[in-house]
Amino acid sequence: MENAPPVGIGYYTASEAARLIKVPPRRIQRWLEGYASASGGRSYRSDALWQSQLPRANGHVELGFRDLMELRFVDAFEKAGLSLQTIRKCLAVAREALGEARPLSTAKFRTDGRTIFLQAFGEADEPELLDLVKKQFAFHRIVEPTFKDIELMGGVPSRWWPLAGRKTIVVDPARSFGQPIASASGIPTAVLAEAAIAEGSPAKAARIYEVPVDVVRDALRFEQELAA
């Protein structure tokens, strides 16, 4: 089929990605499309943090699964207080050190990321954050929560289990173009959640789709959390 998304990469619009990782779409557009700013009567242009896996469509950025995973790390670092300028410097150092275009979500970054940040911080004007990164526990407090629900294969993300503590729901770029599905049956979580609402109970929806009722409950909770 012409213009069909490539299999195995995943496919997300900026709005879909924002919904899944729970950040405003404008932040994703800022990170992956760049932005213009002005100061002192001069205009400045900040480039995208990286080139997304998929080509733009109708003038809009579109993302793959690796993009989605990397954006989760950018979000975690911004929430920890790092500026986008510092994250950009860390990315540049990480790419060179690890030889990866998308290094933040790799197993190597998990072990060597603190050293990479220290190197980047040496060139950044954020001394108050340097102590945070120097402390091993502080760096891991930022990084580990994002890694713990990712399954790595060959040192890079292969699947994401987005429902905390559960493996009933999966985001897998090799299945359903990376849309969230019930891991065993492959039924989209949106379908199961809509059925539970339409039928008046998860149990009735579970009988219709021949899946365990816990899976329907998890799909319903997952979709409700995304909508919240």
Image (cartoon, rainbow, N blue to C red):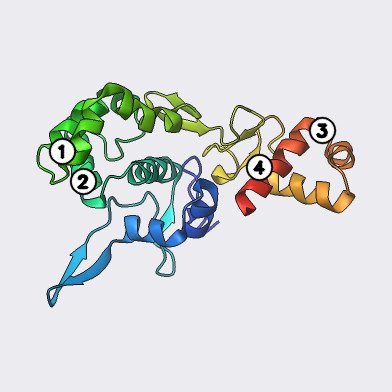
Relative image position of residue 16 (x, y in whole percent): 53, 55
Mark toward the viewer: 1 or 4: 1
Say whether residue 170 is left or right of residue 5.
right
**What amino acid does circle 3 point to?**
Val
Does label 4 or label 3 sit earlier along the sequence?
A: 3
| Corner quadrant of residue 192 | top right
* Callout 3 secondary element: helix
* Callout 1 secondary element: helix
Residue contact at pointers 1 and 4, CB within 8 angstroms? no
Residue 188 visible at all: no
**Above or below 11: residue 46:** below
Relative image position of residue 175 (x, y in whole percent): 58, 38
**Above or below 110: residue 26:** below
- Between the C-alphas of marks 1 and 2, the distance is 7 Å
- Between the C-alphas of marks 1 and 3, the distance is 49 Å
Quickly name the residue at label 1.
121
* Callout 4 secondary element: helix
Residue contact at pointers 1 and 2, CB within 8 angstroms? yes
Q: Is the residue marked by circle 3 packed among few (<14), some (14-19), or many (20+) residues within 10 Å?
A: some
Relative image position of residue 95 (x, y in whole percent): 21, 37
As drawn, the residue found furthest toward the front would be 128
Mark drawn on residue 86 = 2
Mark toward the viewer: 1 or 3: 1
Image point (38%, 60%), residue name:
29
Quickly name the residue at label 3.
213
| Corner quadrant of residue 119 | top left
Mark toward the viewer: 2 or 3: 2
- Between the C-alphas of marks 2 and 3, the distance is 46 Å
Q: Nearer the viewer, residue 8 or 152?
A: 152
| Corner quadrant of residue 166 | top right
Quickly name the residue at label 4.
222
